Image: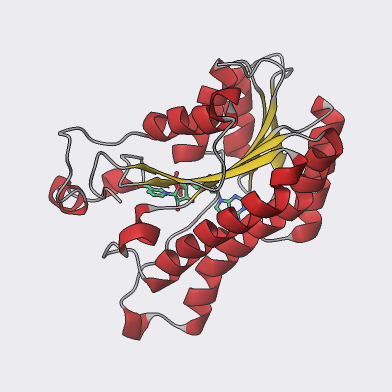
């Protein structure tokens, strides 16, 4: 791919999908700004990607706090000069059945997964407009496509919202040569999902077309494609990365 001159922000880069996405982008030559609430995790990852600190840098930022996001965007520009790619990956789940989902719990997930993504787009898109180029990749979920059980209405609603934001921004930012797409990963084997039994994980994969588990790197490869010029006629789409659990 052609990411040599590119600078990418990855939110929630500390572990799981975000970490794999950052490593994949860096492997294609991008310089990566690693944004996460957990500074220790992104410091460690930055050192792994580039011990010299030239091609990867950690930034402590809570995506739900607009001043922190604006500050981190400025610090990223200061470090790398420009921003070409924004991967909105930071997200949480707080699963309860409907009756046990309080308004607070509903809003908590919406605030991180949807409002946080909106805040990051709002802070970074003007930087992309200035250079008349950008790629935004939003990490949604299979839950937005199928209402997958076991994740909760708060999570499914937040990820459905992400798809709406993606389509709206694709139209709004397209004239500025900014591409906005979403990825809907199915169940991915991460440290977090490995805490569930194999039986539970398999139940999430019911109906899968191909006999292969999903790994963070599968999502990373899809992000690299949507972040590269190989996808320059693609905007506003949802790319399902789920082994064929859902074929829409
Ligand atoms: N793991 C899966 O199976 C799966 C499937 C579909 C979609 N997703 C989505 O992929 C994304 C990553 O999931 P994951 O499983 O790797 O999650 P994870 O919990 O393993 O990692 C999330 C990272 O985001 C950071 N983070 C959380 N809230 C933040 C905030 N407010 N500001 C900044 N950073 C914050 C955490 O510190 C952590 O490093 C999420 O958006 C999730 O909804 C995951």
Residue 57 sits in which quadrant? top right
Please determine whether, in this image, residue 101 is positioned above or below residue 187.
Answer: below
Q: Nearer the viewer, residue 193 or 163?
A: 163
User: Left or right: 181 with respect to 131?
Assistant: left
Q: Position of residue 139 (x, y in %)?
A: 50, 47
Q: Nearer the viewer, residue 7 or 14?
A: 7
Q: Position of residue 103 (x, y in %)?
A: 50, 83
* Image quarter (top left, top right, bottom left or bottom right) of the N terminus: top right
Please determine whether, in this image, residue 188 is positioned above or below residue 118.
Answer: above
User: Left or right: 242 with respect to 76?
Assistant: left
Q: Residue at x 37, y 31 (%)?
A: 218
User: Left or right: 233 with respect to 53?
Assistant: left
Q: Residue at x 58, y 31 (%)?
A: 227
Q: Position of residue 31 (x, y in %)?
A: 68, 22
Residue 83 sits in which quadrant? top right
| Colour scheme | secondary structure
Q: Residue at x 51, y 67 (%)?
A: 109
Q: Residue at x 54, y 23 (%)?
A: 230
């Amino acid at each position: 791919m052609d990411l040599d001159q590119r600078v990418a922000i990855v939110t929630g880069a500390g572990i799981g999908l975000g970490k794999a996405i950052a490593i994949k982008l860096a492997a294609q030559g991008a310089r990566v700004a690693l944004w996460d609430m957990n500074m220790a995790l992104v410091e460690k990852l930055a050192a792994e990607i580039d011990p010299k600190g030239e091609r990867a840098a950690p930034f402590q930022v809570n995506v739900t706090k607009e001043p922190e996001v604006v500050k981190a965007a400025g610090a990223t520009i200061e470090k790398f000069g420009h921003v070409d790619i924004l991967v909105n990956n930071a997200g949480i789940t707080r699963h309860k059945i409907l009756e046990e989902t309080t308004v607070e719990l509903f809003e908590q997930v919406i605030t991180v997964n949807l409002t946080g993504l909106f805040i990051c787009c709002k802070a970074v898109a003007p930087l992309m407009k200035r250079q008349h180029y950008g790629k935004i990749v939003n990490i949604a979920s299979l839950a937005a496509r199928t209402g997958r059980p076991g994740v909760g209405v708060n999570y499914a609603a937040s990820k459905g919202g992400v798809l709406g934001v993606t389509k709206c921004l694709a139209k709004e930012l397209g004239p500025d040569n900014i591409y906005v797409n979403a990825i809907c990963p199915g169940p991915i084997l991460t440290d977090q999902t490995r805490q569930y039994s194999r039986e539970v994980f398999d139940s999430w994969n019911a109906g899968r077309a191909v006999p292969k588990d999903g790994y963070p790197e599968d999502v990373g490869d899809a992000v690299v494609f949507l972040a590269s010029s190989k996808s320059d006629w693609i905007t506003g789409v949802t790319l399902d990365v789920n082994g064929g659990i859902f074929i829409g």
